[in-house]
Amino acid sequence: MLSSRALRRWTWWHKWSSLVCTVFMLLLCLTGLPLIFHHQISHWLGDEVEAPVLPAALEARRASADDMARAALALHPGRVVQFAGQNEEDPRLWWFTLTPTMAPTEDFKSIAVDARSGEVVREYRVGEGFMDLMLRLHVDLFAGLPGKLFLGAMGLLLLVALVTGVVLYAPFMRRLAFGEVRRDRSTRVRWLDLHNLLGIVTLVWLFVVGATGMINTWADLVVKYWQNDQLASVLAHYRDEPAVQPGEQLPLQRALQAAQAQLPHTTLAFVAMPGSSFSSPHHLAFFMRGDTPLTAKLLTPVLVDARTAEVTATPPLPWYLKALLLSLPLHFGDYGGLPLQLLWALLDVASILVLGSGLYLWLRRR
């Protein structure tokens, strides 16, 4: 049983952690709702890139990775390929990220190429459209890394609000049956009962989504730490060698074959070119996806020397990168297809009611 002093302390933490984060959590819930159905909405809006229909005799054909890269670069001469990868939902498509240099930048073009014919399908509408607006608001508020870290702090306050809410809910519910809404009382009391009921029903989901969302905001810092810590130690003997120049890099297809031979039961997720943020100045970094439901969400890097095609290392990802990779699909409900998407949407709407009712109760306080 909480003492009156302890109750006041828990109430203070619950009230202020909730008030500070509520408006931003409402924004995230509202923008997250269409993102749950991003494939369906993009298809409906005509933004989803789909592989063209080819004759059955051509379906098994596969173009060289170098031919696909040249086709993408032909659209934007003067740029370089920084990243490339195989579409997870449709392996008949590859995407290529083209940038002015290998340095991290927001100035990039994304090109979809047919992996069978090696021809460009279309250019993604980067920074345009309804879904891109929802994604940027949800991820960083159009503020880059500072916006991500700010939303991560709001996610932490949400977790504090949930924990303190559970502590306060226990003594409160001793006076009522579980799920009871006192309809004979004032409007504010009815909303209080509804707030408590929906809060306890959505507790686990809100905690999971809040925690995974908070982890996702740390992605840039986590990857940077991995590069400076484990990746730097693995590649220490390359420290004094000159960086690979564009004319010295071996064909991409040859390096890909070396990576696939190293991990034969995997498929390519994406490759980072030498000098990009996910690689080193001397390597092509192939990130390979497993062939089981769990390992398909995890990636294993294969570092291939960009001059010799020799596999330098296959360092296992540390636990914090695995947590990051698993948190992203769990956050958006991408594990179980449409049934899980519908469940995520229902819980999202319930969470909006929890947040909105909490704000209403504070505004109508005595």
Image (tube, rainbow, N blue to C red):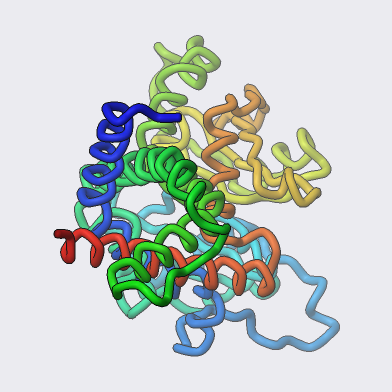
Relative image position of residue 269 (x, y in whole percent): 62, 51
Relative image position of residue 281 (x, y in whole percent): 42, 29
Res. 163 image quadrant: top left
Task: Inspect this view and state whether residue 93 appears.
Answer: yes
Above or below 213: residue 314: above
28 relative to 256 in the view: left or right? left
Of residues 39 and 57, which is closer to you in this image? Answer: 39
Of residues 296 and 195, which is closer to you in this image? Answer: 195
Res. 234 image quadrant: top right
Dividing the image into 4 quarters, which one contains the N terminus?
Answer: top left
Q: What count of labels does the image hold?
A: 0
Residue appearing at x 40%, y 45% in the figure: 165
Res. 103 image quadrant: top left
Above or below 56: residue 33: above
Of residues 253 and 96, which is closer to you in this image? Answer: 96
251 relative to 230 in the view: left or right? right
8 relative to 86 in the view: left or right? left
Of residues 345 and 35, which is closer to you in this image? Answer: 345
Task: Inspect this view and state whether residue 246 appears.
Answer: no
Relative image position of residue 117 (x, y in whole percent): 66, 75
Residue appearing at x 64%, y 33% in the figure: 302
Above or below 251: residue 329: below
Dividing the image into 4 quarters, which one contains the C terminus?
Answer: bottom left
Relative image position of residue 267 (x, y in whole percent): 73, 50
Residue appearing at x 40%, y 11% in the figure: 240
Above or below 236: residue 351: below
Residue appearing at x 63%, y 24% in the figure: 315
